Amino acid sequence: MANTQDQQGGQGQSQSGQRGFGSMDPDKQREIASEGGRAAHQSGNAHEFTPEEAREAGSKGGKAAHESGNAHEFTSEEAREAGSKGGQARGSNQKDE
């Protein structure tokens, strides 16, 4: 049996490490996923979230991140800045209504 370097062109990784979407360059993955999203929207098969569904999904993601310890903990300065940006954006949207 040949060694993995011979099978993989000298890269020394197992065969499964060189196959599939996960082994691709992140930019290539993003490009392929983006094409799939555009195609789904054009064909009418893409799910369009209602504001309530989006709120619920965001809430679930935030809870999961906090439970696993992966959530970003804002400093008071970061929170103040984010709130200010959100308020400015909301205020500019309301002027048009």
Image (tube, helix red, strand yellow):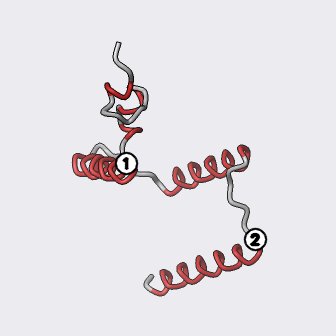
96 relative to 76 in the view: left or right: left
Residue most extreme to the bottom: 95
Q: Is residue 95 above or below residue 27?
A: below
Q: Nearer the viewer, mark 2 or mark 1?
A: 1
Q: Position of residue 95 (x, y in %)?
A: 48, 87
Which quadrant would residue 11 be assigned to in this image?
Answer: top left
Q: Which mark is residue 52?
A: none
Picture coordinates of residue 27, whole percent (x, y): 36, 54
Looking at the image, which residue is at 50% across and 82% down?
Answer: 94
Establish if 97 lies above or below 75: below
Q: Is residue 13 above or below residue 46?
A: above
Residue at the (71%, 73%) spot, across then down: 79
Q: Position of residue 29 (x, y in %)?
A: 35, 47
What quarter of the picture does the C terminus occupy? bottom left
**Badge 1: residue crowd in 10 Å (few <14, some 14–19, many ≥20):** few
In the picture, measured across the screen, residue 74 lies left or right of residue 61, that is right
Q: Which residue is mark 1?
A: 25
Please give the residue where the numbered disc 2 appears in the rendered image: 75
Callout 2: 10 Å neighbours few (<14), some, many (20+)? few
